Image (tube, helix red, strand yellow):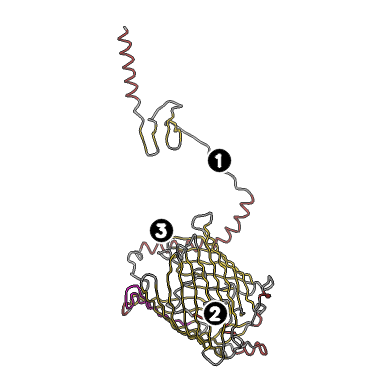
Amino acid sequence: MALFVMWAGTARAQDETREQPPARTGFWGRTQAPSDTLGAYTDCLWGPVPARHDSVSTDLVERSRPAWETAVMVPYWIVGIPFRIVYLGLDQTVIGMDKLGLFGAAAEYPGLKGPFETYIMPVISIGDVEGFTLGLDVTRHDFLGPGNMLFLQGSRSTRKADELSGGTLFNLGKTWAVQIGAGTDEKNLTRYYGLGPESIDGDLSYYHRRTTWGGFEVDKDVGNKIGLELRTYFSKVEALEPVYEIHQSLGRVHGDEIPFGYPGQSNGLTMRLAMYRNNADQTGRPRSGGFQSLGVSLFEATDDSRLQYLTYHINLEKFFPLWHTDRTLALRAFVNRISNTGPVEIPFTRLVTFQRPDELRGFHSLRFYGMGSMALSAEYRWPIWVARGRDDMGVDAYLFSDIGQVYDRTAEISMDHLRFTGGAGLRLIDSERGFGARFEVGLSSEQTVVRLKFSQTFQYDKKGMLYGKNPTKVY
């Protein structure tokens, strides 16, 4: 009898073992085999897991949005309407182009293949001074050696502005580089409102401004994201009577208050020594780090004017990641100051003014003239479209504000002379996470300014001589 009971218990245990498969070890830890019993639990990485049941239900309660959060979101959605429309258009356009296979075979360099291993790129831009501009850029990579470059560009605008310039870059080892550049820049309808921070828009006049330059720059990478540059160039700046808008010429509008140096020209040599530090990870969507530069320039006249002066420049930029993915706050502050070390007055064409990259983007370039300038800039950036699987290529939107003024004496720095501007824009980011172009609308109490440019006020490209940029516009 005892043997029968033991055999029956053993058989029942074996049957239960066959009916209940052993527990399995899964990706998240040890899981319990299926069971119909309630209360059977097992342990895993996230804690006890109940056994599988016939049905499991739960109630999901969504937290109601407080009234203050709704009020804050209303202007956000209103401002974002045009950006969402642009996003939809760009997204569908690129998807359609991708289906046609237009992104299948990329060229080695951007542009159309030209003679002598050059690449030609048509350029369209909108400037506050130049107007609508059409031009061509010609680039020759590995010019006279690997890593070198030759660049030429020419343009013509609807406001009678012409530019022809170019330059070369030669890499001398890993830490040295030499740039050589020259060009001419002619603007028939340059605006002039007066001198100092109190000039008013009602005094708008025009003059013909012509600039010619040529020189070289030596760059040295000293490590730890720090570099040095020594730039030397000759420049001639002419201020002439306008051929167009004669009824609003500078001489006719300003009468007895004609600035020193009009009409006339200024010739001279400039030597600039600067140090910069760039620890931002990219130029397209930098999320941390910054860009800082400090420079001093000496101008010595080559004509009989005996003009001589020093110009000091300080630029501080910093990028802060925000609480949403890929959203960034960019801050910038800059100061420019002229110290007259010669026996004569400085002509107005050589004075400090707001022009790229040191701009108040709600005003036209060259709107104010003074012995010094100072400004603060802020940009809130966020992506609105990114090409899927294209290494972050896309379009970012941004809101910006610039606050600053020009001054002749430090006593003129005051809240009464500060000018406030703001606006919004779009930034094109290329496939290498670099800055491509910007389209922005700047607003101020005087005017609305529309710009389409291939350079930015933040992280201004240091290869200015190579790309033929007018060095008299960069302090």
Tag 1 residue: 61
Which label sits on residue 129?
A: 2
Q: Is 422 or 284 nearer to us in this picture?
A: 284
> Which residue type does callout 1 highlight?
Val
* x and y percentages locating residue 171 in the rendered image: 37, 74
Residue 26, image x and y in percent? 37, 37
Decide: few, some or many residues near mark 1? Use Cα within 10 Å; few <14, some 14-19, many ≥20.
few
The span from disc 1 to disc 3 (Cα, nearest Å) is 34 Å
**Secondary structure beneath disc 3?**
loop
Highlighted range, magenta:
138-156
Is 128 included in the stretch rendered in magenta? Answer: no
Asked whether 147 falls inside the magenta stretch, the response is yes
Residue pointed to by mark 3: 388
Q: Main secondary structure of the magenta part?
A: strand
Amino acid type for the residue under numbered disc 3: Arg
Q: Residue 301 location, x and y as percent?
A: 53, 88
Q: For this rendering, which residue is in front, 422 or 238?
A: 238
Q: Quadrant of the N terminus?
A: top left
Badge 3 vs badge 2, beta-carbon distance below 8 Å: no
* Residue situated in front as seen by the camera: 179 or 416: 179
Query: In percent of the image, x 44 and y 33: which residue is there?
Result: 49
Residues packed near mark 2 inside 10 Å, few (<14), some (14 to 19) or many (20 plus): many
Query: Of callouts 3 and 2, which one flags the residue occurring earlier in the amino acid sequence?
Result: 2
Q: Is residue 60 visible?
A: yes
> Is disc 2 placed on a helix, strand or loop?
loop
The answer to whether 456 appears left or right of 113 in the picture is: right
